[in-house]
Image (cartoon, rainbow, N blue to C red):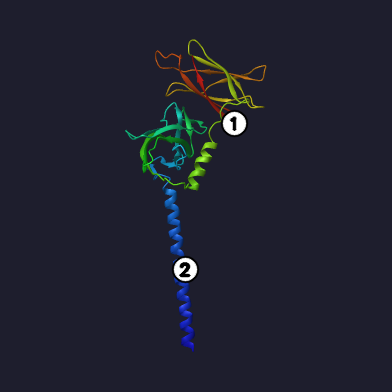
Amino acid sequence: MMNTIRHSSNLALHRRTLGLIFGLMLGFATLALALGHAHAASSDWAVNEGGRMRLVLLPADPDGRREGALVIEPNPGWITYWKEPGDVGIPPALTLAPGSTAVIESIGFPVPKVLDNSGMRDVGYDHAVTLPLMIAGLGADTDTLTVNAFVGVCKNICIPFQADLSVALSHDDAVATDEAQLIATAKQSLPEVPSDDFAVTHYAMRADLKQLDLTLRLPAGTTGPQVFVSGPSGHVFLDGKAEILEDGKVQVSVPIGKLPKTYTMSGKRWGILVLAGGRAMETALAFD
């Protein structure tokens, strides 16, 4: 009788052990499938001394365009750069392989900050940053998209960081939730467009090209804007001085540093980013 009880007990234990092992195997298989699904929307991480980066893409919309993002994660103590990097640095650049039918329609840049570093002023990010993208022109039979990303990361020195980031494209309607949320959050961090209560109402460049005069309408209760003016490639002007006008608007005079030789304003488009009252607004300045 005792042997029968012991045998039954051992058999039950054996079955429970097999059940546990099967459950773990099923769990690992499910996790692997989930990770595989998420990985299919993202490139591998490219890594260098100063940080890492990857490319994320969502499934195509009805017009065949794909939202995506370049994710840049500097290591602690390192920075990366805005589209105009300041005194030194390398702005992000994305290119597609020669002969590709795809086109990068847009790259968004979240609000940067001015970073003082040993007497030099950089414009960029001292934290992880996600740059939203829109890519069009991918053929329906394209299985992989490769984007060459070239960014700068900086600590005591600035290091070029270049990598080919390849994403296996999904042609079904499945969306990797984490990647979709990542891109949605990045889009929310972009500056807003001009509005009735936050806009540039007038601008003019002095004849000697030494000063840009701006009139701004700011959110209620704010008087001290921070202004980033991006001129020719490689030039960003930051030291605007504000004066409150009688009608509640703000006059800002931005000194313009040395421009390229023989530079003329006619037909040029500059950019402006204004921070005020916890909000950010970005627009273009077109010069006739």
Check the image and name the residue furthest to the left: 98
Mark 2 vs mark 1, CA separation in Å: 54 Å
Circle on res. 92: none
Q: Looking at the image, which residue is at 52% across and 37% down? A: 187
- Asked if 219 appears above or below 10 in the picture, the reply is above
The quarter of the picture where residue 137 lies is top left
Q: Position of residue 9 (x, y in %)?
A: 48, 80
The three-letter amino acid code for the residue at tag 2 is Leu
Along the line of sight, the residue nearer the viewer: 196 or 140: 140
The quarter of the picture where residue 198 lies is top right
Question: Is 216 placed left or right of 20 in the picture?
Answer: right
Q: Position of residue 212 (x, y in %)?
A: 52, 16
The three-letter amino acid code for the residue at tag 1 is Arg
- Asked if 284 appears above or below 174 in the picture, the reply is above
Query: Is disc 1 surrounded by few (<14), some (14 to 19) or many (20+) residues within 10 Å?
Result: some
Along the line of sight, the residue nearer the viewer: 130 or 177: 177
Residue for badge 2: 20
Check the image and name the residue furthest to the bottom: 1
Q: Position of residue 247 (x, y in %)?
A: 67, 18
Residue for badge 1: 279
Q: Could you tell me if the residues under marks 2 and 1 are in contact, i.e. CB atoms within 8 Å? A: no
Mark toward the start of the polypeptide (2 vs 1): 2
Q: Looking at the image, which residue is at 39% across and 40% down? A: 140
